[in-house]
Amino acid sequence: MSIISSLLDKIKTKGGKSSHKQSQITHDDAVLAICVLMIEVSKSDDTFDDIEKDKILDTLEHKYNLSVDQVDSLLKLADEKNEEMISLYDWTKIINDTFDYDERVNVLRTLWDVAHADNIIDKYEDYTIRKIADLIYVKHSDFIRAKLD
């Protein structure tokens, strides 16, 4: 299933819940979860500035090999999901169900890249990434290493 058809399926599904069973989480679900978490980090300091947004766009395009149209659709959907979000749990659960430990550490590195984009690590960005690290079961030492990479 392509990311575009997956995104359209999520938009059409009432409540935005995936129609996939938990055991059938797709790569697209995981990329959506990472995008929602990147947006959460960027908004945690109450400023979703262009530098951080550009970093998210660049990450989606290059790290996940998405076209500009796919990135635009994904970012729009992820921003909507972020606004509706009550807790990080649903999104971090997708990360846990999809990725092994080293890949989860790489997710943290991606979140730190967004936080570092404007060369300022706000205490709320740090707190948000720390909370996500706890929810995806990354050891504190690896959290620090990811922060410093």
Image (tube, rainbow, N blue to C red):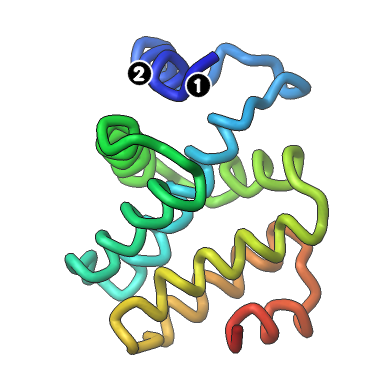
Quadrant placement of the N terminus = top right
Crowding around mark 1 (Cα neighbors within 10 Å: few <14, some 14 to 19, many 20+) is few
Checking the image for residue 11, the label placed there is: 2
Q: Using the numbered discs, state the Cα–Cα distance from disc 2 to disc 1 in whole angstroms.
A: 9 Å
Q: From the viewer's perspective, is 114 left or right of 136?
A: left
Question: Who's the residue at 35% across and 56% down the image?
Answer: 58
Q: Nearer the viewer, residue 126 or 86?
A: 126
Tell me which amino acid carries mark 2: Ile
As displayed, is residue 118 above or below residue 92? below
Q: From the viewer's perspective, is 38 left or right of 94?
A: left
Crowding around mark 2 (Cα neighbors within 10 Å: few <14, some 14 to 19, many 20+) is some
Tell me which amino acid carries mark 1: Lys
Q: Secondary structure at mark 1?
A: loop
Q: Quadrant for residue 101, please give it.
A: bottom right
Instruction: Please tell me which of labels 2 and 1 falls first in the chain.
Output: 2
Q: From the viewer's perspective, is 98 left or right of 68?
A: right
As displayed, is residue 108 above or below residue 93? below
Checking the image for residue 17, the label placed there is: 1
Tag count: 2
Q: Is residue 80 visible?
A: no
Please provide percent x and percent y for residue 31.
Answer: 52, 40
Checking the image for residue 142, the label placed there is: none
Q: Secondary structure at mark 2?
A: helix
Please provide percent x and percent y for residue 105.
Answer: 71, 65
Please provide percent x and percent y for residue 123.
Answer: 42, 86
Please provide percent x and percent y for residue 91.
Answer: 57, 44
Q: From the viewer's perspective, is 148 left or right of 82?
A: right
Question: Who's the residue at 41% across and 65% down the image?
Answer: 41
Question: Who's the residue at 47% across and 41% down the image?
Answer: 65
Question: Who's the residue at 69% across and 84% down the image?
Answer: 145
As displayed, is residue 16 above or below residue 124? above
Of tags 2 and 1, the one toward the viewer is: 2
